[in-house]
Amino acid sequence: MSPVKAIRSVLVSAVFAALSACSLTPAYERPAATLPDEWPSTAPADAVSVARWDEMFGSEELRDLMAQALAANHDLAAAKARIEQARASASIARARLLPYASAGVSASRNREGDGENRSLRSTDQSLLTVGYEADLFGGYRAAAGAAQARLAASEFDWDATRLVLQADVASYYVQVLALKDRLAIARKNLEVARELMSLVEVRFRNGAASALEVAQQRATLLSVEAEVPALQQSLVETQSALAVLVGRSPEGFEVEATTLAALTLPGIAPGQPAELLQRRPDVRAAEARLVAAHADIGAARAALYPSLQLSGSTGVTGWLTGGSSTIASLAASLAQTIFDGGELRGQVRLTEAVREELVESYLQAVLTSTKDVHDSLSAVQTTQARIELLTQNVEEARTALRIATARYRAGTDDLLALLETQRSLFSAEANLVQARLDRLNASIGLFKALGGEWSEAGQS
């Protein structure tokens, strides 16, 4: 047989074996998960609906910070490296589906015999070998499918890491602005407390107020003053945490925006519950690992059956000595494990058990995702209602403080009534800032629960 025909026979046999191979991988069906029929609508009528993180709150500064975080965050870079690892593993698994070829050249020169009978013998050979292990029962195809599914899972893990990073950047950003608002309120309240301190001291000098009243107002003034450095420290720490998230040194890092009022209140369209299965990267990663587990079962089952090895080689020998001749060979071998102590069947049971575990993990991921959306939608509603009530509370408290100050100045009421209205206003203003922060965080939580960015068709 000519060398060309020998190689051709090997390849034809390999193709025939591949085409006739059967698969032992179970058919994959997505586990049936319980999802609500609809999400309730929560967005205020004047809210601007958003579908991307960089549209949230209408802040160009926040958009820039998110871009910096995506470019420089080390956790995200590590997740990217894990994708490359999975991609290499998938490439290795696919390589086993193809024939392999090797070429080699060898030459030797030996002196034989003794004395006058000694002779010099030269041998040489060049050889091209082509081999193929026929994937008769789909084991290699199953392994390649499992590797590809794990690559998809690593990509979804990267998406999940990115989603958490974006949510954290947004959350720290609004916390910074809330602290700036609280600082501004504390400084304003400090001015009010100082004005009242001056009033009490004047009344004390005129005999209209007691030393007790002076001490009470001074205690209130010191309490308000003590809030300022505490808030300043919280602001420094929160800005430092935000700087680390975006990959920058805390030294010299500062958020330019000064108030939560600069942000627009976002509305987020939750879409259909079933879209969570395509939006949430953690759910998609759980399903990709389940797909890989199905393929692992096929690979483990295929190992129970015989393996067929095909090989062919052709070459030339004697080309150094001028008497070259062509050599060729064709071989096939069939191997079957007779006894392994139950190792291979144990491997099948192991892969089946892993598949069952991942089914439950997937269903739990879906259930958790619906809980996240449910809780976030509720938080959006309740925080919005709380803002409306606290806004009215602040207005009433300001009116009460003006009246109480006037009555105290006129001598109608004592200082205790004035101090109580003063504390009520300070508390109401702090509560309103916290409610606005909670409302924005609820929007961030809802956006994260829904899987982050998505297109108009509802696909992430």
Image (cartoon, helix red, strand yellow):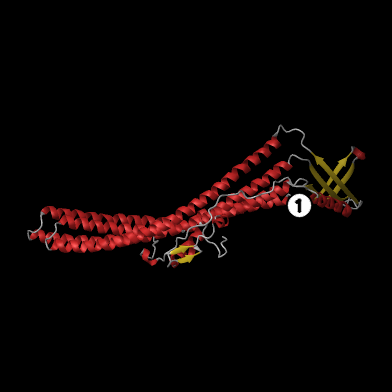
- Relative depth, front residue between 124 and 66: 66
Residue at left 53%, top 49%?
367
| Labels in figure, total | 1
449 vs 293, left or right, is: left
The percent coordinates of residue 235 (x first, y second) are: 35, 57
In-image side of 274 versus 20 (left or right): left
Comparing 71 with 209, the one in front is: 209
Name the residue tied to disc 1.
98
Residue nearest the viewer, comparing 18 with 335: 18
Within the image, what quadrant is residue 233 found in?
bottom left
The residue located at (41%, 55%) in the rendering is 241
Question: 254 left or right of 298?
Answer: left
Q: Residue furthest front?
A: 37
Answer whether residue 75 is visible to the viewer in this image. yes
Image location (x, y in percent) of residue 408: 14, 61
x, y percent for residue 114? 89, 37
Which residue sits furthest left?
Answer: 207
In the rendered structure, which amino acid carries the disc numbered 1? Leu
Image quarter (top left, top right, bottom left or bottom right) of the C terminus: bottom right
Q: Is residue 101 left or right of residue 52?
A: right
Residue 175 can be seen, yes or no: no
**Disc 1 residue crowd, few under 14, some 14–19, many 20+, Cα 10 Å:** some
Secondary structure found at label 1: loop
| 88 over 71 or under it: above or below | above
Can you give x and y, in whole percent of width and height, for residue 102 in the image?
A: 78, 50
Residue 221 location, quadrant: bottom left
